[in-house]
Image (cartoon, helix red, strand yellow):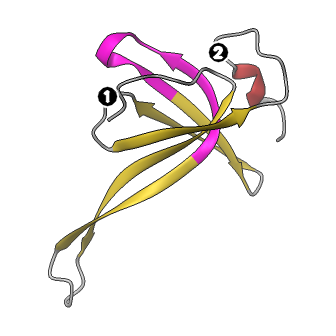
Amino acid sequence: MITVLDFVPGDIVRVHQKIKEIDNTPKGGGKEKTRVQVFEGVVLKIKGRGDNKMFTVRKVVGGVAVERIFPLMSPNVEKVVKKGKIKEKIRRSKLYHLRNKIR
């Protein structure tokens, strides 16, 4: 769970998220495994206030864009690491115009 929001739209971040998997094979017997999955991309927007705050991260994989919305107070979000900024100067709070650009 994140307590302090130290990034803004236009930053490149790595979101570490906990994923629960259930092994339903005959050998596994329904055991739960937890792993951490990393999602790296550009923050497009931050919306909400207080505990209801969410942020959207966008990345391009093989020419296909993927956007994920992460709740800030989710126990599944372990940490968010800020890697840098995009090259353009940011003057907006919602960066929807980046959807039309090919990155």
**Horizontal side of residue 16 vs 28, given as left or right:** right
Q: Residues within 10 Å of mark 2 (few under 14, many from 20)?
A: some
Say whether residue 87 is magenta: no
Which amino acid type is shown beneath numbered disc 2? Lys
Q: Quadrant of the C terminus?
A: top right
Please, is residue 78 above or below residue 34 in the view? above
Q: Residue at x 24, y 84 (%)?
A: 25
Our reading of the magenta stretch's main secondary structure is strand
Q: Which mark is residue 73?
A: 1
What residue do we see at 31% from left, 34% from top?
74
Seen in the picture, residue 94 relative to 58 is either above or below; the reply is above
Q: How many marks?
A: 2
Using a 10 Å C-alpha cutoff, classify the residue at mark 1 as few (fewer than 14 neighbours), some (14 to 19) or many (20 or more): some
Relative placement, left or right, of 95 versus 38 is: right
Q: Tag 1: residue type?
A: Met
Pinpoint residue 34: horizontal percent, then vertical percent.
Answer: 29, 63
Chain-order first, disc 1 or disc 2: 1
* Along the viewing direction, whichever of 32 and 84 lies nearer the viewer: 84
User: Would you say residue 47 sits in the magenta stretch?
Assistant: yes
* Residue beneath the point at 52% across and 23% down: 6
Q: What residue sits 64% from the left and 15% below the top? A: 94
Up-down: is 26 above or below 64?
below
Q: Nearer the viewer, residue 95 or 6?
A: 6
Whole-number angstrom distance, CA of label 1 to CA of label 2: 21 Å
Q: Which residues are magenta?
A: 40-55
Q: Quadrant of the N terminus?
A: top left
For residue 52, the mark is none
Residue 37 picture quarter: bottom left
Q: Which mark is residue 94?
A: 2
